[in-house]
Image (cartoon, helix red, strand yellow):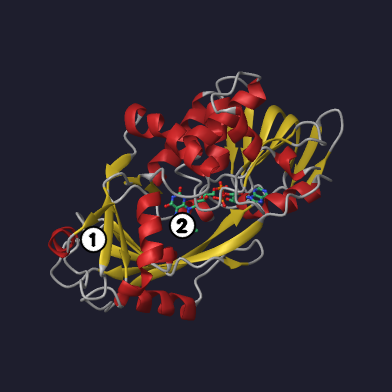
Amino acid sequence: MKTDILIIGGGIAGLSAGARLAPHATVTLLEAETATGYHASGRSAALYEASYGKPSIMALARASGDFFLNQSDYLSPRGLMLAGRADQAEAFASECAEMGMERLSPAETLKQLPILDPEIAAQVGYTPEAWDIDTDRLMQDFAKTIRAHDGQILTKSPVTAITPGRRWQVTTPGARYEADLVINAAGAWADRLAQMAGVAPIGLTPMRRSMARVAAPEGMDPAPWPMIFGVREEWYMKPDAGALLISPAEEDPTTPHDAWADDMVLAEGIARYEAFVTTPVTRMISNWAGLRSFAPDRNLVIGADPVAKGFFWLAGQGGYGFLTCPAASQLAADLILGRPPQLEADIRAALSPGRFGR
Ligand SMILES: Cc1cc2nc3c(=O)[nH]c(=O)nc-3n(C[C@H](O)[C@H](O)[C@H](O)COP(=O)(O)OP(=O)(O)OC[C@H]3O[C@@H](n4cnc5c(N)ncnc54)[C@H](O)[C@@H]3O)c2cc1C
């Protein structure tokens, strides 16, 4: 099958890029699993906020704000709290300032989050500038856009070989494709995919992060509660459809695989959360883990490979793949279609695969 652009990976990266490109080119997206969003993109905490991470991440998040806050309805208000013990005053102060949070009194805190223990949470910061993202609908809508422009999304299509030539030859167990441009949106597998194509890898590291979904405290409705982080991201909790998501917020380096939660890591994270609240966790509903994949400098990797013509990177989304996707996919499309990019040159340089000096 011939196509202009072949996207490999059906997570938020591949789907958002596909939706930007499909009106301008023939797009085919190949996903190894039986459904899109099966890996990291189906396992996130689904939060949008723009004052978290490296400058390039914040720039992408801010540039995504117009799409999220003005042009679409994927967000709903959540709010974000930071809690620190008395002995964490210094780290608390710097994180609170970094995220532009106001400090809350114990009475204000309990109004927002009645289960927090003011004896332990000696200092609390808060910002309303954080929203839940309807990630499922976002991905479905990007997929619909691709199909509406005669693009194809093919699941159960693991790419097993990529051969350079006048056009790229890409093989799956059931088919062969020819494309002018290959977009590597393979998440934790992006380096492996590059190596398959004879392209030098970036040095991406998939990092496992686990999540427990637990019952809300008896008789309480967590819907209006904010998401809350411990200082230095030692744990976080986020209300989720009548239950609570609790994460140990670990970053354990691993290899690309179908990740699952480590029981001990999960238990330790839940204990760190429980130390800050007055209601114990009584029942686990489910748990999972996903891989957040980072480049060595933790910036995303967006751009044409400097050596392999027609091989485009859209990888290294780390813990920010959703909150950056409107601007990241816009940048990818601008670069591919030869349009002037909206992001500033220093940010583009921080994201470019050329920064690794290959
Ligand atoms: C616990 C957790 C919490 C998070 N919270 C947030 C959050 O609050 N906000 C936020 O913005 N981000 C968050 N993230 C990060 C976000 O989920 C990721 O950055 C994002 O999902 C990465 O998307 P992706 O498309 O690059 O990767 P993936 O979703 O992993 O997609 C890559 C796809 O490529 C496919 N693939 C790989 N190799 C091949 C091949 N050879 N052939 C065909 N297909 C292939 C895979 O099957 C996979 O489906 C979180 C992540 C985790 C794990």
Relative depth, front residue between 261 and 84: 84
Give me the disc on residue 43: 2
Gap between marks 1 and 2, in whole Å? Answer: 18 Å
Q: Is residue 339 above or below residue 230?
A: above
Q: Position of residue 248 (x, y in %)?
A: 43, 70
> Would residue 342 be visible to someone looking at this image?
yes
Give me the disc on residue 154: none
Q: Position of residue 326 (x, y in %)?
A: 48, 34
Which residue is most to the right?
165
Residue drawn at the location 59% of the way across and 45% of the way down = 155
Tell me where residue 151 sits by quadrant: top right
Q: Is residue 116 above or below residue 225?
A: below
> Would residue 151 be visible to someone looking at this image?
no
Does the closest atom of ligand 1 sit within 8 Å of the Cβ of label 2? yes
Residue drawn at the location 64% of the way across and 67% of the way down = 254
Residue drawn at the location 49% of the way across and 37% of the way down = 59
* Residue on which disc 1 sits: 242
Quadrant where the N terminus is found in the figure: top right
Taking the image as shown, residue 321 lies to the left or right of residue 358, namely: left
Residue drawn at the location 49% of the way across and 25% of the way down = 148
